[in-house]
Amino acid sequence: MTTADIVLKVTGVSKRFGGLQALSDVGITIRRGQVYGLIGPNGAGKTTFFNVITGLYTPDSGTFELAGKPYQPTAVHEVARAGIARTFQNIRLFAEMTALENVMVGRHIRTQSGLLGAIFHTPGFLAEEAAIAQRARELLDYVGIGKYADFKARTLSYGDQRRLEIARALATDPQLIALDEPAAGMNATEKVMLRELIDRIRKDNRTILLIEHDVKLVMGLCDRVTVLDYGKQIAEGTPAEVQSNPAVIEAYLGTGGH
Ligand SMILES: Nc1ncnc2c1ncn2[C@@H]1O[C@H](COP(=O)(O)OP(=O)(O)OP(=O)(O)O)[C@@H](O)[C@H]1O
């Protein structure tokens, strides 16, 4: 493996909220094509770490490199442009827009025509819109909800809304897809389908960072895992290494999982 294989390299991230040290010197390296898991008991700092690397929170310290280039996670749209797409623990779709339109919105950060083209419907804009719609339909098919393209997002089942969020994230052609608890609230069948989808995305040489409470899902899916506890990185390694690490067992079982 060379440095060219590294998609995300984050080092020394710390974040304090008032008197609470939510993250202390956390770092991860994710290689191309990996599914990388971030786990830990409630309040461990997983979401805070996600929010830092995606530009929602400003860290107190940390260095950030995406596909070999430094990036500053100062604003969400800058991070999206740099190449990280994310989904949210609490689904954030445009409820009154169709599934297709939701995916098209994701694609717009990579388009050329801009606002004036959209207002005046220039030929360049119309051609670009047709291409975006076409790509959005392909992505809906890819995540398995093509038949709902023209349904309003709010009418989709919970599991399908999560798929739609993933399609929207893929539409930005990201270097890295960050999934925040994608299995939350899913039933067993939906989880199996989600797992198949994430596997498929990985096989297509995409790179995924995953926060997930379902340890079984993480262990079955991830190439590497980092475990946070009280804002500290207590373990990093393959699922098998992490699972047998005494500090991890203590964090999950010793204090009743917090
Ligand atoms: N905006 C904020 N202001 C103050 N404290 C915060 C803020 N966001 C998170 N925290 C605190 O930081 C700590 C880490 O929270 P975080 O949500 O990152 O944990 P988590 O591992 O994602 O937990 P969960 O699994 O419950 O989602 C918690 O003690 C939380 O209360």
Image (cartoon, rainbow, N blue to C red):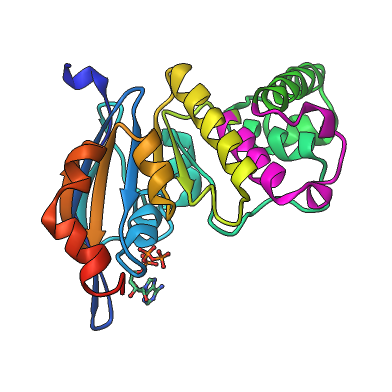
Relative side of 93 to 239, left or right:
right
Q: Is residue 16 visible?
A: yes
Relative side of 50 to 171, left or right:
left
Relative side of 151 to 21, left or right:
right
Relative vertical location of residue 101 with respect to residue 15 in this rendering, above or below: above
* Span highlighted in magenta in the image: 143-170
Residue 198 or 100: which is nearer the viewer?
198
Residue 116 or 236: which is nearer the viewer?
236
On the image, the x and y values in percent for residue 16 come to 25, 72
Question: Which residue is located at x 67 percent, y 25 percent?
Answer: 139
Extreme-right residue of the structure: 150
| Residue 208 occupies quadrant | top left
Residue 254 or 28: which is nearer the viewer?
254
Q: Is the N terminus in the top left, top right, bottom left or bottom right quadrant?
A: top left
Relative vertical location of residue 20 with respect to residue 112 in this rendering, above or below: below
Task: Specify the quarter for ligand 1.
Answer: bottom left
Question: Which residue is located at x 63 percent, y 26 percent?
Answer: 111
On the image, the x and y values in percent for residue 172 come to 56, 31
Q: Is residue 230 visible?
A: no
Residue 127 or 17: which is nearer the viewer?
17
| Residue 84 part of the magenta-drawn span | no
On the image, the x and y values in percent for residue 84 come to 44, 37
Q: Is the C terminus in the top left, top right, bottom left or bottom right quadrant?
A: bottom left
Question: Which residue is located at x 76 percent, y 29 percent?
Answer: 117
Relative vertical location of residue 157 with respect to residue 57 in this rendering, above or below: above
| Residue 148 part of the magenta-drawn span | yes
Question: Which residue is located at x 19 percent, y 57 percent?
Answer: 248
| Residue 203 occupies quadrant | top left
